[in-house]
Amino acid sequence: MDYDKEYFDACMGYMSNNSTSARAFSQMLHRVRNLKENNILIYIGDLYYSENTILYYPECLENNLLESYDTKSGLGNIQKYNKCEELNTKHYLLNDFVNIIERKGYEWEILKDKAKKSEKYDYTNRIEGIDNAKIMQEYEYKILIEKQKEGKLNEEETYILDKYFMSKKFVIDIEKIDEEFIEEHFRNEYLIDNYKQFIKNEETIEKNFDNDLLQDKVEKINKIVSWFIDKEGNKQDIKSEDLRTNFIGFFKDPSIKQLFNSYPKKGGNKNIFNNVSNHILKELGFELQKKRKQYKDKITGKMKEYNNYTIGTCEILTNYLKRVEEKEKNEEELKNNIKGL
């Protein structure tokens, strides 16, 4: 539809995730060509915008993510642009929209909302809610799941289910879940899911866009892991200066910061080892681990120190694997005891 008469006073928009693309949203805002009020007010909620964001672009997908896919012409070429839009919509909706309107010559600004925001399901309240939630009885599970399907869960019941699923995901006695555990593990469930897929068989991870390009991330992480393996296949440490040099070459690939979109777009080299651990290796539950080494200076004879790095599992995954091992051991002992009766 295209309405070009000057009839409507103003246009307002409502932008949110999981709705439509920035391109389609821009088109909808322009259905009416002539408005009495030139400014368009758009509600963006908690959508994130950063001037440092690097959007996905078709050439990047073609060169780095779709190597085995014919994108030169016809349907393949169309798919390339569709996939690019799909990724930008999923990760950078507001940035993509700003990019579109700037190309069209519009001016824009983000207005600060002075109104008090709802705190019903914010991060702090949810952690407190899970911590204070009662422990669900077995008979309550089906009841709450049915209410969840119908969208009828109240806030307290949501926290009860959160606590229950957290105990199952991280294989921990629900009685031991306290505020400290929740703060450390809340919204980190993906570590367990990704690690399981990686351990099961990394070659079976599909190369698609619905799993946040996990297979592509595994390829990049494996490159880092390979630095810590010598020619005989044994683990080796790397000096900090050598590791930093490796990462400088690693980040020359423009697809790295697009795959791991939480990685700082600027200034990431200042704390490069922490940033790699927190924004790249953590996707599979790994991290860089520092070791202090001493050596005797040949000239002065004095003892000096330097940093070495190795790679290992992060604390969340390490503790999870210990609990899984302990659970399997207890189950095996129980089976043997039953057989002995």
Image (cartoon, grey):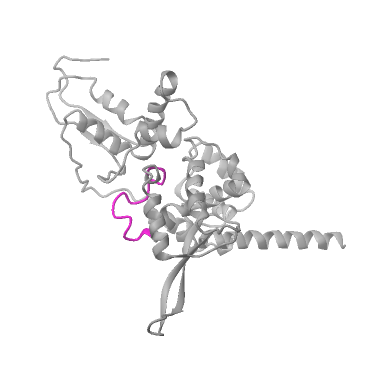
Residue 98 lies in the magenta-colored region: no
The vertical placement of 108 against 245, above or below, is above
Q: Is residue 49 visible?
A: yes
Residue 259 lies in the magenta-colored region: yes
Residue visible at 51% across and 46% down in the picture: 218
Span shown in magenta = 258-272
**Dividing the image into 4 quarters, which one contains the C terminus?**
bottom right
Q: Locate residue 42, reporting x and y percent.
A: 24, 34
The vertical placement of 300 against 201, above or below, is below
Residue visible at 12% across and 23% down in the picture: 36
Place residue 275 in its image quadrant.
bottom left
**Residue that protrudes farthest toward the right in the picture:** 341
Q: Describe residue 186's horizontal placement relative to residue 324 as left or right.
A: left
Number of numbered markers: 0
In terms of depth relative to the viewer, which is nearer, 266 or 24?
Answer: 266
Residue visible at 56% across and 64% down in the picture: 176
